[in-house]
Image (cartoon, rainbow, N blue to C red):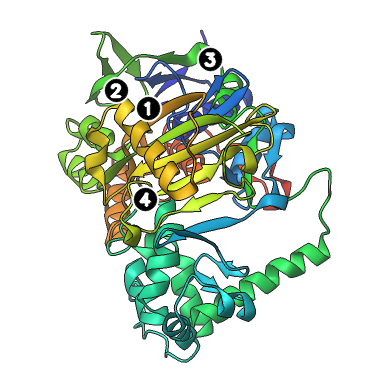
Amino acid sequence: MGIPLKHVVIIGGGVAGLGAAFKVRRAANEGAEVTFTLLEKDPRLGGKLQTERVGDFIVDGGSDAFIAQKPSVMRVAKLAGFDQDRMPSDESRKKTLILKKGELIEMPDGVMQFAPTKFLPFATTRLFSWPGKVRAGMDLFIPKKKVKPGELNDETLESLVVRRMGREILDRLAEPLVGGVHASDPGLMSLAATFPNMLEMEQKYGCLIKGFLAQRQAAEEMKRKYPADPKNPRTFFNTFKNGMQQLPDGMADAAGREGIRTGVTATRLEKLENAWKVHLSSGDVLDADAVIIATEGWAAADLTATVDPELSALIATIPHSSSATISMGFDTDDLGFSLDAFGVLCPGVENRSLMAATYSSTKWTNRAPKGKALLRGFVGGPHNQAIMDKSDDELIAIVRSEFRSILGLNVEPVFARVYRWINGMPQYTMGHLGRVDAIEARVAGIPTLGVGGGSYRGVGIANCIESGEAAVTKVLGELGFAPLAEDTAAPAARAY
């Protein structure tokens, strides 16, 4: 009689949960006596990665891209066998337009995140006033912040940018560009938890401009050293040919769909001496040797309440905000504006309902059929949660009105789709890293429990995958299994 299989229940079918499931499968392929069941409350997998085909349009409702510099997405795609479907953005049309008092102004060449690294484009742009440009240049002369040895170097995005480069840079660049990545309030957003490189730059170079300039020069040197392959260009933004849904679908296929159950909600966890019981909304109860919670933080707080109230309370302190994307298809004949850009940013100081717009069929060459264009607008975020109470028809009308006012777009869409992400974006506010340290310490004290997802140490797709994989490493080790070969391999040998 053989050793009984160990069973891991994974709660959550986004890329964190799928990353965990795929790693359990890889462990089983290496000989570990382990199986998994993944539970997803929605009828589909993917979490905030959702792609819909509308006729010949390919519409991403959530994230439309991943960053190739973070290797986990392509590592997993290679392991799952669909890495050849990576699609780069169309860099020949890469421009970002920023709304200023009703006018669209192209973001100056050489801006990195929010800091200028080229003098002439910054000096001649109409995006900033001359006093604002001079104030930004003072970054070169302002002494760096003093940080005591052993002290956590942290401050809000607003604090850092205003202190070093002035409020105009914050309002016109940093808030829509950097804060927009996390849909966060710059006055609350912890840089140590989101963009620690900015804090490190100030300490290393004495200012931000010199730090970003060094970063740009290093990137240009890499381009000279490794010339681009026209057949396989390296771009900052990447996607997959069939949309970002291809990533969770490919991971689910590789993990094994026989272990995946959709439309099933885990309602309560029960910790026994050496096992778990997972109670489901259907009334069923699953037996498990280990549990991995890969949900939004608020859902993880609910699930851990009966296991460790202190852990639950800690997770519940992470706030979340809601947002929506509204995608529309148009005939290109009478658009009335140029599609030669990746999209538009609407800084908060403009007081618009629209946060941003992406020209999806410009950014990605196969997202709309010939003669058609695909655009999507973003609404919600921390400063406009009230808009999420609007109906789908109302949101479509609001975005159409904004497109009309900002872009001059007066034609009827050939279709419109609304994708809502309720409490979908965790807010990394000041003190976030301390909260996560405390959460991880509590989880470490609960054998065979793992926690992953975007609420903790990174909202990016790669971060979420890695968090699910790390949870598997923890629970498999506690179940007595040896580390996977990929965890002990030298970096050069990994399947990046």
Pick whichever of labels 3 and 2 is earlier in the sequence: 3
Which numbered mark, 3 or 2, is in the foreground of this view? Answer: 3
> For the residue carrying disc 3, how many other residues have a C-alpha within 10 Å: few (<14), some (14-19), or many (20+)?
some
Pick whichever of labels 3 and 4 is earlier in the sequence: 4
Q: Are marks 1 and 2 in contact (CB under 8 Å)?
A: yes
Residue denoted by label 4: 183
What residue type is disc 2 on?
Trp
> For the residue carrying disc 1, how many other residues have a C-alpha within 10 Å: few (<14), some (14-19), or many (20+)?
many
What residue type is disc 1 on?
Ala
C-alpha gap between disc 2 and disc 4: 36 Å
Look at the image and tell me whether residue 352 can be seen: yes
The quadrant holding residue 332 is top right
Instruction: Determine whether 487 is above or below 368 in the image.
Output: below
Q: Are marks 3 and 4 in contact (CB under 8 Å)?
A: no
Residue denoted by label 3: 257
C-alpha gap between disc 1 and disc 2: 7 Å
Q: Which mark is residue 276?
A: 2
Pick whichever of labels 1 and 2 is earlier in the sequence: 2
Instruction: Determine whether 280 is above or below 232 in the image.
Output: above
> For the residue carrying disc 4, how many other residues have a C-alpha within 10 Å: few (<14), some (14-19), or many (20+)?
many
- SS at mark 4? loop
- The percent coordinates of residue 24 (x first, y second) are 52, 27
Q: Please report the residue visible at 38 percent of the width from the left and 19 percent of the height from the top.
A: 39
Residue denoted by label 1: 290
Pick whichever of labels 4 and 1 is earlier in the sequence: 4
- SS at mark 3? helix
- The percent coordinates of residue 435 (x first, y second) are 27, 54
> For the residue carrying disc 2, how many other residues have a C-alpha within 10 Å: few (<14), some (14-19), or many (20+)?
many
- The percent coordinates of residue 115 (x first, y second) are 52, 73
Which numbered mark, 2 or 4, is in the foreground of this view? Answer: 4
